[in-house]
Structure formats: structure tokens, C-alpha cells
Image (cartoon, rainbow, N blue to C red):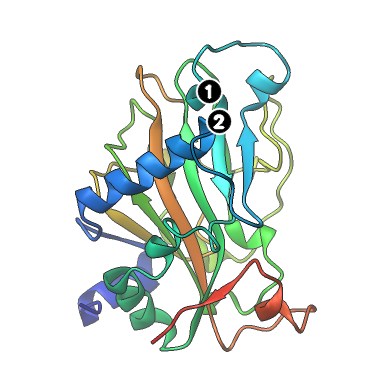
Amino acid sequence: MPLSSNQIETYWREGYLVVKRLVAEKQLDTFSSRFEDIIEGRAHLSPMMKVMKDVMIVKGHLKSDDPIKEVNKLFSLENDPVFSEYISHPELTSVVRSLLGQTIYSLASNVFNKPPEIDGRHPMHQDLRYFKLRPADEIVGVWTSIGTANRESGCLSVIAGSHKLGIQEHTLPEWDYINHGFYGIQHLDREQRVHVEMGPGDTLLFHPLLVHGSGSNRTSSCRRAISVHYASDLCVSDNKNWRETGLTRKIAD
């Protein structure tokens, strides 16, 4: 079902909205199994898909006998026969269309896998920093928890209303271990953070200028989620052929 007028108002006021149990647990199990099959070599990477290992593993600061716990994320899911079901999920795309209109394209799709026993923090940042598409209001990010995401496992935290501030300066944090591309906003009031704890299938919709990040996973298992951004047909880029790069996918009506 599409979003209600109250939900739409909340999204534009706060910069984010949580929709409970949007994706069924049975389908989440399928996505989780697909992730593990790919990482453990039982299934092949689809075209364009890439695996990112955590920096602490890559640099040899930690070793693991479990290949699953070495991986930070799997990205560019559009051409995978299983993960593409999330990207075109009817309930998910329905709520996104409530914000962007009928014609939408996917981009920047990921399975996030936050392993335990590593630093694993993602500094507070805005996703628009990584996109050339504009305007920002025509892009929506979605993040679905595959299991339970709470403060102990490193759930997302957000600063409500920060999407109204415009793009902020991002730099590399002064941490011992920083995953590739994990730039952050250094000067902000951390007391404003809202920790968004979520259960399986709960889905966060968020504006690309919303300041958000996540902490370390202090549990014994990986904190896993699946995510994608959507852009409306009104978006423009200096790459006029952005719809045809193979990294995006038009979502059928």
C-alpha cells in the first residue's frame, strides 16, 4: 500500500520514516541465504556485483576462519536474479512511488553485513555526497533490516531534520581503521542522534541529505541489511546517459 498523508508529512519533516514489517521474513531469509551462497562460493557473482571486505581483514589486523565475517558489503545487485526481487518488491516500490512518482530507477544497491569483533563504524554522513544525480528531493534511500538491528549490533543512527541543512563538508575520520569511501561529517552535535532500532523486515526510508551512520557490532553475529536508492525520472546528471550505465534499473509499473 502507498504511504498515508501523515507518513509522507513525517518523511519530509524529519527526513526519514520507518515502515514496519514491509518485507516478509521468508523473503529476507532468501536474501540472507543468497548472500552467504555468493560469499562461500556456492553461487557466482552477477555482472557488475562486487564484494567489499572489511579493512581490518584486508590489512591483516584480524583473521577469521569464517569468510562471511570478513565481508563488509556486497553491492550493485541489479542483475542478480534473487536480489533483484528486493529492488522491484511491490510493497517497497509502492511506498517509494508515494514520494517520487510513478517512474523510478534503482541505484546504489547493497547488502550490508556488519561483522562482529571489528571496528566497523560508519561515520555520520550524507549519501548525496556519493551521487551526481540532482535534485536531492527526487532521490529516496531504503534500508531493510534482515535480522534485528539495535544499538548492540550497530543499528543506524540519524539526525532528524538534517536533510534541510544542505550538503555538509565530509572528510576521513581520524580513526585507526576506516573502510574505503567511509567519509564523514566531523563537526556535528552527536547528542542529536536518534538510534533507529529495527526488527526483521522493518524498512527505513530516508532523504539523501539525511545525516546518518552506524556504530560497531558488539554481538557475536553479523548485523545484516539490504538497501537500495531510487531516483525519479526528473533527476539529471552530468552523465546524460545515467539510466543506461548498467548500474541502474528502471522499475516496471
Query: For this rendering, which residue is in front, 115 or 168?
Result: 115
Query: For this rendering, which residue is in front, 72 or 40?
Result: 40
Judging by the rendered image, the residue that carries numbered circle 1 is 67
Q: Are marks 2 and 1 in contact (CB under 8 Å)?
A: yes
Instruction: Give, as a three-letter code, the residue at label 2.
Output: Val
For the N terminus, which image quadrant? bottom left
Residue at the farthest right position: 238
Q: What label does residue 71 carry, if any?
A: 2
Q: Where 122 sits versus 144, above or below?
A: above
* 162 relative position to 29: left or right: right
Give the alpha-carbon distance from disc 2 to disc 1, as whole Å.
7 Å
* 185 relative position to 94: left or right: right
Query: For this rendering, which residue is in front, 133 or 243?
Result: 243
Occupied quadrant, residue 18? bottom left
Relative image position of residue 207 (x, y in whole percent): 47, 66
* 190 relative position to 49: left or right: left
Taking the spot 58% from the left edge, 89% from the top edge, the residue there is 234
As helix, strand or loop, the secondary structure at mark 2 comes to strand
Instruction: Give, as a three-letter code, the residue at label 1.
Output: Pro
**Between marks 2 and 1 in the image, the one whose residue lies nearer the viewer:** 1
Residue 60 shows in the view: yes
Occupied quadrant, residue 195? top left
